[in-house]
Image: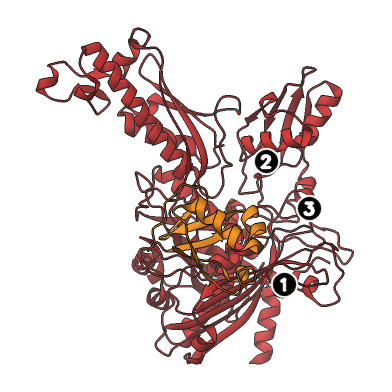
Amino acid sequence: MVKVVVWGSLKPHTGGKAELEIDAGNVRELLTRLGEAYPGLKPQLARGVSVAIDGVIFRDGWQEPLRKDSEVFLLPRMVGG
Amino acid sequence: MTDVDEAMKPGAPILHSTIFTDGVEPKPKKPSNIVRRYEFGHGDVAAGFKKADIIVERTFKTEATHQGYIEPHACLANVGPDGQGELWVCTQGHFMVRDTCARLLGMDISKLRVTASEIGGGFGGKTTVFIEPVALALSRKANRPVKVVMSREEVFKASGPTASTSVDVKVGVTKDGRITAADATLRYQGGAFAGSPVEFGSMSAFACYDLENVRTIGYDVVTNRPKQAAYRAPGAPMAAFAVESVMEELAKKVGMASIDFRIKNAAREGTKSSYGPTYGPIGLLPTLERAKQHPHFKAPLGPNQGRGMACGFWFNFGGQTCVSLNINIDGTAALSVGTPDIGGSRASMCLMAAEELGIPYDKVRAIVADTSSLGYNDVTDGSRTTFATGMATILAARDAIKKLSARAAQIWGIPEEAVTWEKGHAKPAGSNAGNFPPLSIAEIAAQAGATGGPIAGHHEYSADGAGVSFATHICDAEVDPETGATKIVRYTVLQDAGKAVHPSYVEGQFQGGAVQGIGWALNEEYIYGKDGRLQNAGFLDYRIPVCSDLPMIDTVILEIPNPGHPYGVRGVGETSIVPPLAAIANAVSAAAGVRLTSLPMSPPKILAALDRKAAAE
């Protein structure tokens, strides 16, 4: 299981929890299972997210591996100007 | 309704009956102008404020500003009777233009070839389409080439400015200057449709600080204005203006020098960022320590002058990238990239390719290839090009070197693994491999036809691992108490570039950010009449800085390598626009002796502030 932290305004979709335990070995599995476990997150997942793993932000990269002790944050999809 | 605070008031006219604020519980049953609520942070801010000896709480406002590129939007479309189309366009992302236009017009993507023209400035404002689908549709209808060029008035009215904002900041500190809690509420209007950059303002607001208790709440709001477009570090400068103004005030209240206050509270490696992840190696502290030693900080100030400073942060990212490097038969290299060059990136790419291949810089030529000549590339934005296209260039060059080494092995009749590459030459790996004189790229390329045909290196990937970047800016401003006019008399930018591949262009990015910030802070604003009409859609009435308004912008490049890039590159294009609003506001406030909380700090606002100060004394 990987512990993933979602940003505050997603908590209404996760039963009020910011920290979620998800069984995922990589980013793709994480996003798929987040949507399955918390269907309310699906619109945000469809709009796009980034995943920060141990301090590095991944905007793409489904295959990026997750370890049990990885620090994982769900973040809005990065944009720039 | 053009003001963000007015649009949020109960009873405000509702723009869309379909918008029900997302991100709040329970889900509202009535429509609202608030599209979405964001919240970031960690710890317990209420408990943190209880530990504070001093608390500063203020509200700040900024006006919408345009990216101000000198070249207006322009394109030339030609769709033939066979349905094949060509488009030449001034854009930050011609693949995005191709895909968007093809979708809008029901064309196969393969039937539309888009060429990015040389760009006269973008700053985020050319990351979407405006006139391009129209030109293509007209050309398809008329069966003739169609050119469309926006007038300056159309640029102001119909292409995106950035958001106007209203921001509350509350920060508490102990008597010895340690921040105990930080809280901000950010309200950004992004025009008539959803999508203001408030989420990134909320994430970046306190990113420069090591905070135990922090919270930011952001509201994306719609108003009767043009839809905003991305503007360099979208959302971050306005948040930094509010936060860094409060930090300056707190430093004074606890009796610390501004820079020492920031050094004491600065984020560093291992800090849990205000938006969540723990920082790896970052360069904020080095910029602050270098700033403290800079002569600018010790220089005396003249009458009516004040000094301010501010820090800033931006994320940077990578994105989809494709690069092709062809070795010519004379040993020179032709590099094709798909990211429009908005800041000198072709020169940086040539430097990196030359470094890898071991040939002189002037033997590599880079072009921005059209959409039919290269695989998909994301837009040039997010400070991504020197990082992502640069890394792809390095990896494409390494791919070419592998192939060049294999050709050398063929020429010598030895195994490929018995060849090494050094300083632009293939060499036998050791005495066992044979005694052959080194072969240059030109010598190998000259025999390409006989050894397998053309030699090229490629790399295609989704680049990740971009490094966040930080900057510290110092500004001296002089305020004329008679007219309220402000002159920036000295300005210094210190920023972590990770690795400055082309230092002059890096300095140019630093200076450009500072100059845009000077305009944003002092003069630029969208002015609406009571009838809701824009009153200053032209450069005569919307005043961007010109050379005579500016001092020489001094720069200091720091290099704290990004572990995610072979040379350590971080993006540099956007971070430099984040601190200026606050640095200038802090300098002007120091010069005027009164805190300025509303941008732009135009002469009427400064005179009004001076009058309020005089009335209070």
Q: Chain of mark 1?
A: B
Q: Is residue B370 left or right of residue B395?
A: right
Q: Amino acid at mark 2?
A: Glu
Give neighbour class at mark 1: few <14, some 14-19, many 20+ (Cα, 10 Å): few
Please name the residue that numbered disc 3 is placed on: B537
- Residue at image location 53% in from the left, 54% down from the top: B574
Q: Of the residues under marks 3 and 1, which one precedes in the sequence?
A: 3
Q: Amino acid at mark 1?
A: Pro
Q: Nearer the viewer, residue B21 or B209?
A: B21
Q: Chain of mark 3?
A: B
Q: Of the residues under marks 1 and 2, which one precedes in the sequence?
A: 2
Q: Of the residues under marks 2 and 3, which one precedes in the sequence?
A: 2
Of the chain colours in the picture, the one used for chain B is red
**Residue sitting farthest toward the left:** B431
Q: Are marks 2 and 3 in contact (CB under 8 Å)?
A: no
- Residue at image location 20% in from the left, 16% down from the top: B414
Q: Amino acid at mark 3?
A: Ala
Please name the residue that numbered disc 1 is placed on: B604
Q: Give the secondary structure at mark 1.
A: helix
**Rounded to the nearest whole Å, what is the CA distance between mark 1 and mark 2?**
30 Å
Please name the residue that numbered disc 2 is placed on: B71
